[in-house]
Every structure is written in structure tokens, then in C-alpha cells.
Image (tube, rainbow, N blue to C red):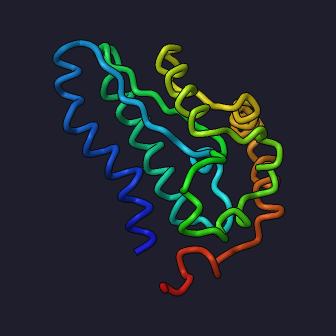
């Protein structure tokens, strides 16, 4: 159930919405598809296999749509937001925060949902394909590109939940 849920939202939701509107935007010659992402789309971490897989699927969808819409006037954007402090997201799985990798401590400050909304608006206005907020997340995204081994190590230390919390854990 968890694996399917992690693919339904965000991946299938974004794929079906994109399918519903993309052709009309291409025909019109303008539009934007904005996919809101998690730092897990940049670097997966232990104990969140299903979640990370859904985020990488959305990343792949965004990249493929950007190729399909190149030169049409339709832009595909990914907005990667850091931890949101006033979200109910973690209420269903309060233990999930303990699976955050140690590198998460460097990605401060955590943001509010209003800050995330402001980042999405700023991303749309910027027209950039990839937009990270807060600023330290942009630094981390750059490190993923230029120093992947270091980031992988920083992601794995302090995050030792492993398979007991991953896809092989027992369903409740």
C-alpha cells in the first residue's frame, strides 16, 4: 500500500494532470507545468525507498516533459522545497523525521507552507527549470552534481533506518 501511495502522489497525479493540459498548452504556444519536489528527488536516503522512488519518478517525468515541450512555449519546472515546519505531512508517520539524513541539518532553515508557496511563485516568475528553496538547498543540489560521492556519504550517515523501514517492512 505504501509503495502505491508514494507513486500515486506525486508521480501519477502529475502525469495525469500533465496529460490533461499539455497538448492544449502546446497548441496555444504557452504554459507552465510546475512540479513541486522534495530533496529526496536529488539524493535518496535510507528508510524511505518508496518515497524516494516516487520522487525520482516525478523527476524523470519532468525531464521527459521538458524534452517533449522544448521550443513549444511551454516550460516545465521543478521546485524543490526543504522541510516544511507547519505541514500535517508527518502526522501520519511521526517516526519518518528520524529517518532524515544527517545532511538535512545543513539545509536550514526549515520553511513554512507560506514560504514554500512564495518559493513556487518566485520559481514561476524566474522561468528557471530547476528552483530550490531555501538557498542552502541550492548549494546541496550543486554538490550533488559536482561531488556526488560526498553527498551520498553525508546522506547515508545518520540515516540508518534501512530495510526495516523500507519497502520490506511489514504492513500494518
Q: Is residue 39 left or right of residue 50?
A: right
Measured from the top left, where is residue 129 in percent x and y? 50, 24
Which residue: 50% across, 58% down? 53
Which residue: 71% across, 65% down? 99
Q: Is residue 66 left or right of residue 148?
A: left
Measured from the top left, where is residue 156 in percent x and y? 77, 61
**162 lies above or below 125:** below
Front residue of 23 and 123: 123
Which residue: 51% across, 65% down? 50
Which residue: 76% across, 55% down? 155
**105 lies above or below 45:** above
Quadrant in which residue 97 is drawn? bottom right
Front residue of 78 and 145: 78
Front residue of 39 and 134: 134
Q: Is residue 171 left or right of residue 150?
A: left
Measured from the top left, where is residue 12 in percent x and y? 32, 52
Which of the image's four quarters has the N terminus?
bottom left
Total labels: the figure holds: 0
Quadrant in which residue 15 is drawn? top left
**147 lies above or below 12:** above
Measured from the top left, where is residue 48 in percent x and y? 60, 65
Quadrant in which residue 94 is drawn? bottom right
Amino acid at each position: 500500500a505504501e509503495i502505491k501511495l508514494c507513486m500515486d502522489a506525486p508521480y501519477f497525479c502529475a502525469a495525469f494532470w500533465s496529460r490533461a493540459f499539455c497538448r492544449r498548452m502546446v497548441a496555444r504556444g504557452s504554459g507552465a507545468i510546475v512540479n513541486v519536489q522534495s530533496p529526496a528527488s536529488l539524493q535518496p536516503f535510507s528508510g524511505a525507498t518508496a518515497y524516494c522512488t516516487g520522487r525520482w519518478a516525478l523527476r524523470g517525468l519532468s525531464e521527459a516533459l521538458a524534452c517533449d515541450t522544448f521550443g513549444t512555449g511551454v516550460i516545465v519546472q521543478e521546485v524543490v522545497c526543504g522541510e516544511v515546519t507547519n505541514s500535517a505531512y508527518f502526522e501520519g508517520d511521526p517516526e519518518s523525521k528520524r529517518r532524515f539524513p544527517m545532511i538535512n541539518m545543513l539545509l536550514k532553515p526549515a520553511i513554512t507552507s507560506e514560504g514554500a508557496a512564495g518559493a513556487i511563485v518566485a520559481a514561476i516568475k524566474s522561468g528557471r527549470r530547476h528552483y530550490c528553496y531555501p538557498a542552502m538547498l541550492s548549494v546541496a543540489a550543486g554538490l550533488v552534481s559536482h561531488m556526488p560521492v560526498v553527498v551520498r556519504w553525508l546522506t547515508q550517515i545518520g540515516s540508518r533506518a534501512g530495510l526495516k523501514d523500507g519497502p520490506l517492512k511489514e504492513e500494518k
